[in-house]
Image (cartoon, coloured by chain):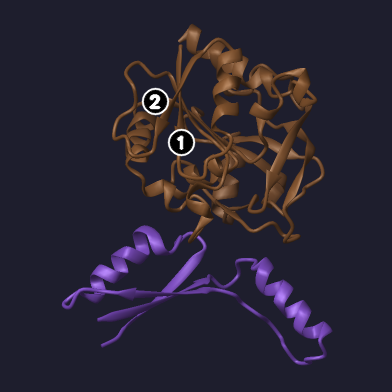
Amino acid sequence: MKAAVLQFPGSNCDRDMVEGFRKAGFAASQVWHKETTLPDGIDVVGVPGGFSYGDYLRCGAIAAQSPIMRAVADFAAKGGHVLGVCNGFQVLCETRLLPGVLMRNAGLKFVCRAEPLAVATTDSPFTNGYGADQTVSVPIAHHDGNYQIDDEGLAALKAEDRIAFTYQDNPNGSRADIAGVLSENRRVLGMMPHPERAVEETQGGTDGAPLFAALAGALVAA
Amino acid sequence: MKAVVTVMLKQGVLDPQGEAVKSALGSMGFDGVGGVRQGKVIELDLADGTTEAQVTEMCEKLLANTVIESYRVEMGA
């Protein structure tokens, strides 16, 4: 199993994400944003957190136009698995691989703490290692995590069971407490909380590890 | 030649920064500020002959996220 983690100028969670994949058994490498193709045989692409291009213009907007994102869009269109975390979630929304948009937190403050999440669906290759409605504790660290989507989009997410995680104590004003959403084919997940910051005890918890393990299991089975 | 692009959040989209500015103005004693919307102005220095349609394409593809933002293009001399 091979994972590729993208690296933009300003990414700062890329090595954590590589470690998250490696602990789950992936061979993981980093891919610079100027590359136009993904390495051969990639099973999953990780779009990491950070502040790509300094969050200039809009969070994730400039990264979404980088050469490697065209390759990622092709990869996703062919059914590839993609995990976007924090800034990576913003990038995936800006590329329209996921619906909606991340806006400035309603409280206008940067929030950084472990946050209780509810697993809103276990029907995905990312979340089937959790129990239904299980509460997990995963760190958040963001200024622009306020997920917004129009009525029609929200209705579609609900009808298709594509809300992956919800906040139990909404920290940023996100519509319907949404912390993470899935694509229509359920193979692209974007989430603001950082599962890669909760894969070993020295990080203060391991509630993120089942996500990487579930993905490994899904890819082995595939 | 220059073009000025004004990007604003669409009506109905919550603007937390605008709300904060409105609240600050109120606490400073400025009464009667019914609403504040915050946006951005982007000045483009362009090759002569660049068309408004090209600037519009720039807006659609990068400068504005049309899910939540509207934009206005003013072509200058």
The structure residue drawn at horizontal position 73% and vertical position 72%, both measured from the top left corner, is B20
Q: What element carries label 1?
A: strand
Q: Which amino acid does label 2 sit on?
A: Gly
The quarter holding residue B37 reads bottom right
Please identify the residue farthest to the left as the structure is shown.
B49
The structure residue drawn at horizontal position 29% and vertical position 64%, both measured from the top left corner, is B57
The quarter holding residue A31 reads top left
Foreground tag (2 vs 1): 1
Q: Is mark 2 on a helix, strand or loop?
A: loop
The structure residue drawn at horizontal position 76% and vertical position 84%, both measured from the top left corner, is B25
- Could you tell me residue B69's position as x and y percent? 49, 66
Residue A138 placement, left or right of B71: right
Residue picked out by circle 2: A79
The residue nearer to you, when weighing A31 against A167, is: A31
How packed mark 1 is, by other alpha carbons closer than 10 Å (few <14, some 14-19, many 20 or more), is: many
Tell me what hue chain A is rendered in.
brown
How packed mark 2 is, by other alpha carbons closer than 10 Å (few <14, some 14-19, many 20 or more), is: some
The answer for which chain carries disc 2 is A
- Could you tell me residue B45's position as x and y percent? 30, 75
Quadrant of image for the C terminus of chain A: top left
Label whose residue precedes the other's in the sequence (2 or 1): 1
The answer for which chain carries disc 1 is A
Numbered label attached to residue A7:
1
Q: Would you place residue B16 above or below residue A192 in this image?
A: below
Identify by letter the chain in purple.
B
The residue nearer to you, when weighing B54 against A35, is: A35
Q: What residue type is labelled 1?
A: Gln
The quarter holding residue A122 reads top right
3D distance between C-alphas at marks 2 and 1: 22 Å
Residue A159 placement, left or right of A199: left
